[in-house]
Image (cartoon, rainbow, N blue to C red):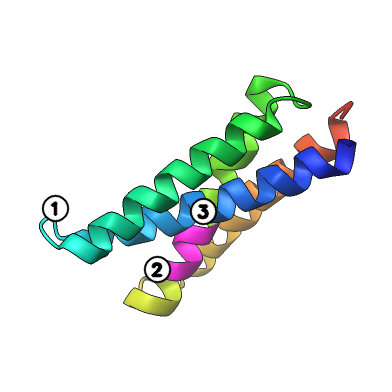
Amino acid sequence: MQNGVWITLFFAGILEAGWAIGLKYTEGFTRVWPSAATLVLMGGSIYLLSRSLTGLPLGTAYAVWTGIGAVGTVIAGLVLFGESRSALRLLCILLIVAGIVGLKLCSDA
């Protein structure tokens, strides 16, 4: 059960990154299919986050969820939108990843 909630949380974070990226394509929710896909990803992300809370503390789960979403969104920005790959920016992303790993290692779940 312990690893199950972490796996669920991981996928919740992936979906969180997905809907954040989807926002770029909705053009202010004026495009139907990107908007619909984004809303589905939002719902799935929140649902999986709520399921992970059955075995994880709220603060830990939320921090990891947003961290995975942030890292995924930044990586997508690098790949899809040609955003900056400066060394300082990449170091900051690594710090977020280190925080996620640290929370997992310090968790009782």
| Sooner in the amino-acid sequence: mark 1 or mark 3 | 3
Label 1: few (<14), some (14–19) or many (≥20) C-alpha neighbours in 10 Å = few
* Separation of marks 3 and 2 at Cα, in angstroms: 15 Å
- Describe residue 71's horizontal placement relative to residue 28 as left or right: right
Give yes or no for residue 37 being in the magenta stretch: no
The amino acid beneath tag 3 is Leu
User: Residue under circle 2?
Assistant: 77
User: Residue 94: image x %, image y %?
Assistant: 64, 57
Q: Is residue 8 left or right of residue 18?
A: right
Q: Is residue 67 above or below residue 61?
A: below
In this rendering, position of residue 61 left or right of residue 30: right
Q: Which residues are magenta?
A: 72-77
Front residue of 83/80: it is 80
Tell me the residue at 34%/59% (across/down).
Answer: 37
Percent of width and height locating residue 64: 64, 39
Amino acid type, label 2: Gly
Tell me residue 62's x, y (percent).
59, 31
Q: Nearer the viewer, residue 73 or 13?
A: 13
Query: Which label number is shown at residue 28?
Result: 1
Question: Residue 58: which numbered mark, if any?
Answer: none
Q: Tell me the distance, in whole angstroms, between the alpha carbons under discs 1 and 2.
A: 18 Å
Disc on the earlier residue, 3 or 2 = 3
Q: CA distance from mark 1 to mark 3?
A: 19 Å
Question: Could you tell me which secondary element the residue under label 2 belongs to?
Answer: helix
Q: Main secondary structure of the magenta part?
A: helix
Residue at numbered disc 3:
15
- Asked whether the beta carbons under mark 1 and mark 2 sit within 8 Å of each other, the answer is no
